Amino acid sequence: PAREPAAPRDTSRDAPRDGSGEGAAPRSLMLCGARLADGRTVDVRLGGGRIEAVGTAGSLAQGTPPKGASRVDLAGYLLLPAPAEAHAHYDTALTAVSPSSDGPPRSAPEDVQRRTTEAALLQLGFGATATRTHVHIGDVAGLRSLEAVLQARRALRGLVELSSVAVPRLLTGVAGADGLSMLRDAVKMGASVIGGCPDLDPDPSGYVDAVLEVAAEHGCPVDLHTDGADPARLSRLAAAAGGLRPGVAIGPCAGLARMPHKAAVRTAERLAAAGVTVVCLPQGDCGVVERPSQTAPPRIAPVRLLRAAGVTVAAGSGALRDAANTVGRGDPLEAAYLLASHGEASPEDAYDAVCARARTTMGLPEVRVEAGFPAELVAVRGSELAGALSLAYSRIVVHRGRVVSRTSAVREFCDFTGTSEFDLPRQSQG
């Protein structure tokens, strides 16, 4: 049986490093023969962590290559800006209890650090070169889980950008005093985003006010969990959050899809006017908000309605094989695929939700396959975006101008007469 061609060889593994200790990019990396989403076939030269030049195939490879340069042949691959993971839960990732397990998952700091590292690398393999993970603080664990996530972040530097969201349970009343103090400590430790779930606090409005106050004190963005089923509560949140910089995101907001249409439109318009971003979770909700029931079935946020109202909508993965979603895959391209397959977005707009809009939500610079932009890229086997979202198994991931991950899928078929009769391909092009 025929095999899919071997993954393109990357000679950058042997290239010199710059001594920064972070696995820096080689002096120059050439991506040859890549197909872009607009149909062009191009060569792309990377250097210094950025895209130096984009030219027609073969045009940049002429002459003597710069010293230390390396090449990756991307014939048969579609080259895209790398996606970003806008909503993960690494402290609980990979903790789904199987029938053969000997007890609940361990929550010691070393276990959280190991799970965080494994989950971040898993998503890096899918193409996410930047991730934002929500981390529980308070209760029994205190700040230990956050410290473990920050340790993993330091260990992963140079492979993937990892930012953390501090998520306290309570922030109001006597019971919330400790949570408020711990939230401030979390920011001092290194949490870069203020989070939480106002739906679970006895005083949701007071919870939002406390989060916004701490965020304003430290100049941090805000990323809150809410089901979004209460239009009055969302309107109050929009009024309080309007104009806050560097910005406010909420999600997964599946409850908006259960609202009467007119109420949902009015609420979406208020969110848009306040500049609040919605991060939806097409692969399923996470365990922070109340789980679906017979009266509140699982759905994703009404992306088309929100976009029509002018709301910025990004998409994340949510739970990754934990109690909230035991089969969560954490693949940004699958999140985009689900948005498109549910009719909430075109393939192009769906990919934008996990790429450009996710990066904007996370405060990251824009990425395009154009000269001058950051070299954050993913190459997937295929020739056009819709096909890539459907069957993107083979992937090559570029972070800071160097290849940091590659996945090569081989598909084989036994011999049968139909292949020769119809000249069918023997290997997947996805």
Image (tube, rainbow, N blue to C red):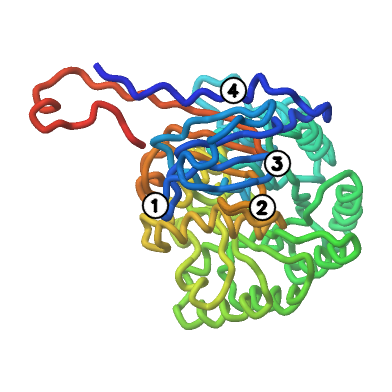
Residue tagged by mark 1?
A: 39
Q: Amino acid at mark 4?
A: Thr
Percent x, y for residue 38?
42, 55
Percent x, y for residue 328?
51, 40
Q: Residues within 10 Å of mark 4 (few under 14, many from 20)?
A: some
Q: Secondary structure at mark 1?
A: loop
Percent x, y for residue 392?
41, 39
Q: Amino acid at mark 2?
A: Gly
The quadrant in which residue 161 appears is top right
Distance between mark 1 and mark 4 Cα atoms: 27 Å
Q: Amino acid at mark 1?
A: Gly
Disc nearer the start of the sequence (1/3): 1
Q: How many marks?
A: 4
Q: Secondary structure at mark 3?
A: loop
Instruction: Identify the residue shown where x is 75% and y is 61%.
Output: 222
Residue tagged by mark 3?
A: 49
Of residues 139 and 369, the one nearer the viewer is 369
Quarter the C terminus occupies = top left
Say the numbered circle drawn on residue 372: 2
Instruction: Identify the residue shown where x is 48% and y is 54%.
Output: 351
Distance between mark 1 and mark 3 Cα atoms: 25 Å
Disc nearer the start of the sequence (3/2): 3
Say the numbered circle drawn on residue 11: 4
